[in-house]
Amino acid sequence: MRTSYHTEAFQVVDCFNMIHKQIAEICENLPQEESCGFLLYKQKKFFVKQCENKAEDKARYFKIDPFDYVNAFKKYKILMCYHSHVLGDESPSDYDIKYSEEMLMPLYIYSTVTKKYKIHYPQKLRMYKNLKLLTESKVKLCIL
């Protein structure tokens, strides 16, 4: 039993490391503007979905097309939204916090400056931190 637990723990760590690596790679490929997208889940698989940033000031803000939300929502479970900060660290801005609270969606923020990330959880979803999906074994990461 103990071996199984440790194997699952390593699978979770490996999966999260792959997710972080993929999001960081997407963000680093657009160093002049904030990248954005979703971390999705379906049938024991995680999906990183990149979206086009529709904001007018792409260096300071991100905006995801409502149709991207609808399409993701129809096909997957949306776990969180990700975006990058190209002008500062990974701390959520006031805009990020407002967005997260209004959408009731956790935000994964990656800084291309510090090369670090932070996950902001909306106040009403603090229990969401315990993503049960990450404890399931045999999860796979798929890039869309």
Image (cartoon, rainbow, N blue to C red):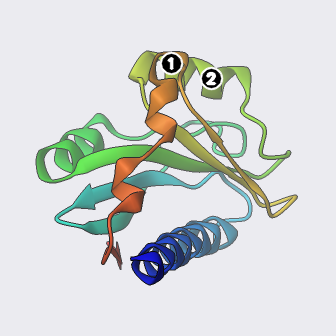
User: What label does residue 31 carry, if any?
Assistant: none
Comparing 126 with 46, the one in front is 126
Comparing 70 with 11, the one in front is 11
| Distance Cα–Cα, label 1 vs label 2 | 6 Å
Seen in the picture, residue 28 relative to 123 is either above or below; the reply is below
Circle 1 is placed at which residue position? Answer: 101
Helix, strand or loop under label 2: helix
Residues at marks 1 and 2 touching, judged by CB atoms closer than 8 Å: yes
- Side of 87 where 15 appears, left or right: left
Comparing 102 with 79, the one in front is 79
Query: Whole-percent x and y of residue 97?
Result: 62, 23
- Side of 134 where 68 appears, left or right: left
User: What label does residue 97 carry, if any?
Assistant: 2
Amino acid marked by disc 2: Ile
For the point 45% across and 16% down, which residue is it?
102
Badge 1, how many Cα within 10 Å: few under 14, some, many 20+?
some
Badge 2, how many Cα within 10 Å: few under 14, some, many 20+?
some
Seen in the picture, residue 78 relative to 41 is either above or below; the reply is above
Amino acid marked by disc 1: Glu
